[in-house]
Amino acid sequence: MDDLQNLQTRQLKARLESIATAGEILRVSLGGTSLSEAVRTLLLGLVDLVPCRALCLFEIAPKSLRELGRLVEGDEAATGKILNLEEAGEPVLEMLRLHRHAMLDSLPSLVSGAPAGRAILIPFEGRLGGTLPENAGESFQASHLLWIDEPESSELPAEILDTLIALASQAGVLLTGFRYRDDLERTYSALREANQRLQRDIDRAKRIQEGLLPHGIPKIAGLEMDWRYLPAEKVSGDYFDCFPIDPDLPDGPQCLVIADVSGHGISASMVMVMFKVLLKREIRPGRDLTEVLRRLNRTLLEQVGGIHFVTVFLATIDPVTGSMEWCSAGHCPQLILKADGTVEELMADGVFVGMFDDFLPESRVAPLSSGDTLLLYTDGITEAEDPTGELFGMDRLKRQLSQAKDNGPKAVLDGLLGAMSHFEEGLARQDDLTLVAVRVC
């Protein structure tokens, strides 16, 4: 009886020591920073335990074994080999189906040019969820396979086998975790590189877009003006401009335009760039503003196909007479601050540019007197929100503008932006914002 108890005690002690050895190998493997390092550490920890011709760890994939690491006669060798499971033979498939370790004869050697021989195959558990890979309708519970090629001993000592089995019950989870981490790191690296390329493209688009906007405030006899251009993102769907209709008459009638492309980001900015090029091509002395917008609408429909539309306020103003002809296509009502402090709205009647075939804009005339100020804006100001979600709105904009009747364009715009900022109470702007103030001297 005492002999049996001593034997059981020795066996239990040996098994605990095997588990401790497996745990130590795993603990060291956890210090790796990648799947390849963890595999390398794992194999190096086993090479002294299991003298053999070659030691290899495979990842079990659908219909194949993908090699993760290999030691040949104790030294690292090239990895990456893929073994076809069907060609491996029925004994290997049966061992994987039953999820049991096995000593098999006449298996192909992992060493190039070496003859076939014995091999010990030990499946590792450790999938982290998901479906199991299938091979000819069979599902394998193992995630990895340790292949011991031509072991020196035809039968492994019990304590060594216990160590390998203890290792197999835990190492699969470790290796699968490293695989997931490596995959995530590669994905993150690819996303980071793609984002960097995108940011470089956006920066280039921003520089191109800013190059298409007016540079500096023009000096035009009879008019005083200022503007603010505040994109919510690096690129914007807002556009504004002021230029002489006849390039040979820089102080003659001026074209004033403000536009807002639907949406945000690069695609909206591309449509804005197209709009500017088309406008400069279409507007010319003697051509009606309505004809200009009809031509723009037709071309944008052909080129953009309704993906984006553009709201436009287009006007011509004569600095000498103060007469202004204007035409609006779906743009928010623009404002005239009269010298006496009253505010008039220039209401929009037309539909958006680039959306409908039956586009029939109308033009109107508005006289401007000395001291009057025309305010052109996009809806980034009227749709600004305070922390409760209330909009800045048209009424608040008109009241604020009316208080600036004695101010020049710069002071008018500074006052409007200051009032909007106070209203928002520090909230980030969600929309592009453009303001243009033109005062008749």
Image (cartoon, grey):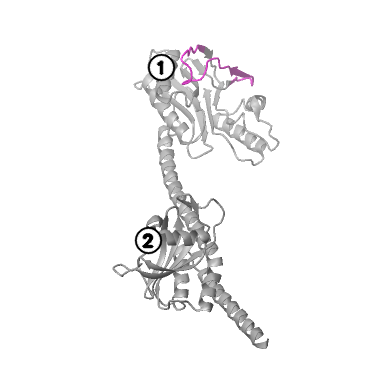
Q: Residue at x 64, y 40 (%)?
A: 427
Front residue of 263/72: it is: 72
Crowdedness near tag 1: few (<14), some (14–19) or many (≥20) residues, C-alpha within 10 Å: some
Do the CB atoms of the residues marked 2 and 1 lie less than 8 Å apart? no
Of the 4 image quadrants, the one containing the N terminus is bottom right
Residue 250 visible to the viewer: no
Above or below for 118 versus 391: below
**Residue 332 picture location, percent across and down:** 57, 22
Q: Secondary structure at mark 2?
A: loop
Front residue of 297/373: it is: 297
Left/right placement of residue 371 relative to residue 2 reads left
Above or below for 390 versus 335: below
* Distance from Cα at disc 2 to Cα at disc 1: 62 Å
**Residue 374 picture location, percent across and down:** 55, 22
The answer to whether residue 342 is magenta is: yes
Foreground label between 2 and 1 = 2
Q: Secondary structure at mark 1?
A: helix
Q: Residue at x 39, y 75 (%)?
A: 74
Q: Residue furthest bottom?
A: 2
- Which residue carries the number 1 mark? 295
Q: Which mark is residue 80?
A: 2
> Which tag, 2 or 1, sits closer to the chain's start?
2
Q: Which residues are magenta?
A: 336-364
